[in-house]
Amino acid sequence: MSAGIDLAFKSLAPRASDWAAILPELGVAALSLFALLQAMVVPARLRWLIPATARAGLVLVAVMAVTGDGGVVRPADEALFGGLLRHNLPMAGVRLVFLSSALLTSLMAGRFLAARGAGLADYHHVLLVVTAAFMLLVQSDHFVPFFVSLETAAVGLYVLVGYLRRSEASLEAGVKFLVAGGLSSAFLLMGMVLVYGTLGGPGAGDSLSFPAIARALAAGKGTVLTLAGAAMIVGGAAFKLGAFPFHSWIPDVYQGAPTPTTAYLATASKAAGALSLLLLVTGPFAPLAAKVAPALAGLALLTLLAGNLAALATADIKRALALSGVSHAGFLLAAITAAVARTDAEAFSYPAENVVVLYLLAYVAGTFLTLHSLSAVPAREDHERPFISLRGLIRRSPAATAGLCFGVGSLAGVPPSVGFVTKLLVLALLVKAGLWWVLGAALVGVAISIHYYFGILREAVSRPGEDREDAAPLEVGAVSRFIIGALSLSTLAAGVLILL
Amino acid sequence: MENTSLAHHLLLAGLLFALGLVGVLVRRNLLVVYMCLELMLAAATLALVAFSRFNRTMDGAVLVFFVITVAAAEVAVGLALIVALYRRRGTVSSDRLDVLRP
């Protein structure tokens, strides 16, 4: 008996290759601890070292992740850590989404937090912990790492949203996010418990592991409670993504959060929601595709319409971008629906997973470009940025205006930006999968979004500023100008490259 | 143990979960809302332990430890946020959270 137990433990013990497979995540986690360490020992005049090392480290990790897991290229179907993790998604692109979001957030946070007298070391520590957790979340193949990494990220995000302790808006957004997020994790956990309990049993194997759940569901073991549990889990992931019935927290939280956190929420958190939803519906719940696909299609349709219509009604830029993010979540949901309803839904030889990752990368570039340009415009309160405050921006800062144009253009999907190309890929997927209603909603959504996106640009470009004192030229730092230029160029270049 | 079945445990867990949900939706005091959230997590944990015992699989019991740890971290951050908000605003009523409006 004891020999048997020994063998079981040996087969589950982590191998060196398991650790090598999560080297990028280990790197990010080490960077986060290093930020804290530096905060303890670095003297005050060398504080700039803390964000600088974090950024340099993130660049290095990104290079490592893109050039093939530190030289270890793994077959996609290999289980890691005894079945806890598995690389089911195109990991290079997925890691790039999270690493680039973290890097761009850090670049935006530097000046933003310094101007408000908030600490940089803690912000970077939490930011990097959340990034590492998201990167582990999207490789989960078992509900234990899934839940733990999702919650680690969620708790970190509560901190980042409420980070400005002296700002009522930031705290209020933090508390609202806390209650909404807590509710979603309670439902997620209950769903996991129901799936685990109804599919488990003597000899049924580990019913928290994704492949075991898929096997049990394919064998027709599920009951009504299992379905309810699956719905709760999918709902929990849809909450992260900000899909239709679960999107009510998004405008308030995005508006009140410090702008760098808003950008991070909009990109990394949304990406984590989209990718984990994709993992769930194509992994453990794949045998339920016949039930899941129509539900997802309905969610996508409603999300596309709700996000765009709500964005029409607001005059605050951060709120408008938050709600436009909901409509982008609709696009992502549409691509995920196509992946579930996959009748060989391969558009231009890109499978649905790659389309989702490409869409996310384009969305990261567009969002950060827009918010970076926006944060160059001073605001009395960070959570009050009405469209009108942009009036005459083109005279005050041509660089910020150009960035805003490229960013908003890419988000709106103006050809030949990368946003246009990725929207086209999603639409092609929808055509291949025959989801005509969703396709219609997507087209209507794009038409509506042009109105509010160009409402932002109209204020910035065509209306001359009156002769007031706040019409003075803006100083945009060299670093900001470089980031705006690089991102603008990349939205254009990536769009053209994918088209070719 | 002979007189209790899995159904009893699940019924109790379901009731606690529903009670917590009603509290979250109905109560205005943020601290009470937060307690109700924790009640929902505890209900899920109870169901988890019950399933683990009656299915005779250990995986659920292991997950409980993770859930408790995560809940502790969430409470630490959550209470810190609520206390900071109270210091700033002098109230923890969710009716008074009205800085962020369209």
Image (cartoon, coloured by chain):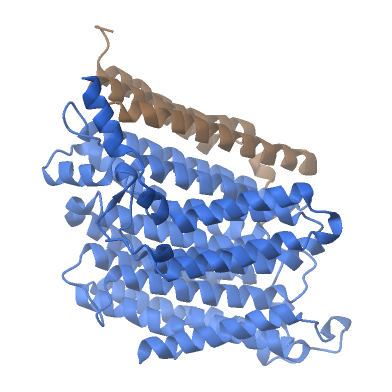
Chain colours: A blue, B brown
Residue drawn at (19%, 51%) of the image: A288
Which residue lies most toward the top here?
B2
Name the image quarter holding residue A212. Answer: top left
Seen from the viewer's position, the closer of residues B17 and B83 is B83
Residue A127 at x, y = what percent?
61, 55
In which quadrant will I find the N terminus of chain A? Answer: top left
* Vertical order, A49 against B71 (above or below): below
Residue drawn at (69%, 65%) of the image: A52
Which residue lies most toward the left here?
A219
In which quadrant will I find the C terminus of chain A? Answer: bottom left
Residue A139 at x, y = what percent?
37, 54
Seen from the viewer's position, the closer of residues A241 and A348 is A348
Seen from the viewer's position, the closer of residues A42 and A277 is A42
A93 lies left or right of A458 = left
* Vertical order, A368 against B41 (above or below): below
Q: Is residue A348 visible?
A: yes
